Image (spheres, grey):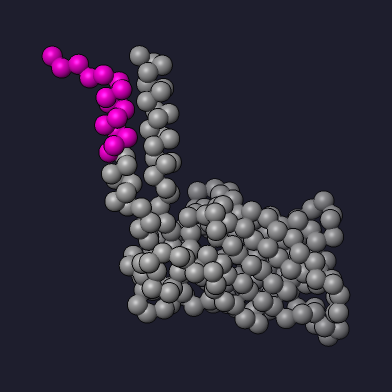
């Protein structure tokens, strides 16, 4: 009968995890979901009225539920209720991205920073980075669901600094709307902006796998 020492088993499992993780490290996966935006950050700029000052609030994007990414932005005037809520539920390529203004001010820009998440914005450059497939240039306004006006402009920036990136993967995206005027406040209180976008994902670093294995082995030893 062969006896297996716990330390030897741990070494074998960790070595296997390292090998598997090294093989998959930084592989791009074109299928991404809203909860994989978690770790990113959304910053919104507001203008209370024509010619008013620019006010800025920021909040982390978190996983509210499986496949659901959310950010709850503080009110720009410091009131104890949300100023805006962002939601992305489901596949980021085909699902609706949603931003609702709950503040008494006009939203003039939204900047998504996915540094800190495992997600990247994917535009439609050709050739596409291996694994990313075709993306979407900037944003695609959804006029059917939106009550907010269409954007003035949008652009992706802060490229992913990996040699395999062919120029279509970015960490950040900015969306701009018109400034309020006396005739039209544009993206103001109660309005919702819906759009289509596209992100890809990078697998989590191998360290997370090793930590998980270490915890499992420790629990097993305690039960022995």
Residue 87 x, y percent position in the rendering: 60, 59
Quarter holding residue 31: bottom left
Residue shown at 85% from the left, 79% from the top: 50
**Magenta span has 7?**
yes
In the image, 113 versus 183, the foreground residue is 113
In the image, 93 versus 127, the foreground residue is 127
**Magenta span has 216?**
no
Residue 144 x, y percent position in the rendering: 59, 76
Residue shown at 58% from the left, 56% from the top: 40
Residue 105 x, y percent position in the rendering: 81, 69
Bounds of the magenta segment? 1-16
Q: Is residue 13 left or right of residue 143?
A: left
Residue shown at 41% from the left, 78% from the top: 125
Q: Is residue 130 above or below residue 62?
A: below
On the question of residue 158 being in view, the answer is yes
In the image, 219 versus 147, the foreground residue is 219
Q: Is residue 143 above or below residue 209?
A: below
**What quarter of the picture does the C terminus occupy?**
top left
On the question of residue 132 being in view, the answer is no
**What quarter of the picture does the N terminus occupy?**
top left
Dominant secondary structure (helix, strand or loop) of the stretch shown in magenta = helix
């Amino acid at each position: 009968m062969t006896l297996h020492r716990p330390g030897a088993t741990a070494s074998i499992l960790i070595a296997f995890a390292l090998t598997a993780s090294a093989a998959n490290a930084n592989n791009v996966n074109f299928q991404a979901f809203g909860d994989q935006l978690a770790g990113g950050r959304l910053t919104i700029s507001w203008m209370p009225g024509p010619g008013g000052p620019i006010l800025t609030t920021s909040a982390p994007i978190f996983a509210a539920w499986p496949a659901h990414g959310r950010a709850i932005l503080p009110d720009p005037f410091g009131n104890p209720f949300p100023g805006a809520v962002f939601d992305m539920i489901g596949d980021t390529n085909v699902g609706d991205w949603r931003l609702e203004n709950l503040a008494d001010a006009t939203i003039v820009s939204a900047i998504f920073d996915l540094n800190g998440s495992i997600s990247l914005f994917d535009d439609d450059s050709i050739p596409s980075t291996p694994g990313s497939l075709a993306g979407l240039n900037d944003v695609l306004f959804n006029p059917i669901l939106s009550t907010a006006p269409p954007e003035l402009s949008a652009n992706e920036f802060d490229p992913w600094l990996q040699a395999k990136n062919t120029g279509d993967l970015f960490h950040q995206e900015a969306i701009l709307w018109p400034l309020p005027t006396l005739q039209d406040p544009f993206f103001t209180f109660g309005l919702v902006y819906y759009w289509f976008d596209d992100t890809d994902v990078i697998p989590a670093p191998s360290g997370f796998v090793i930590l998980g294995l270490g915890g499992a082995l420790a629990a097993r030893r305690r039960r022995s």
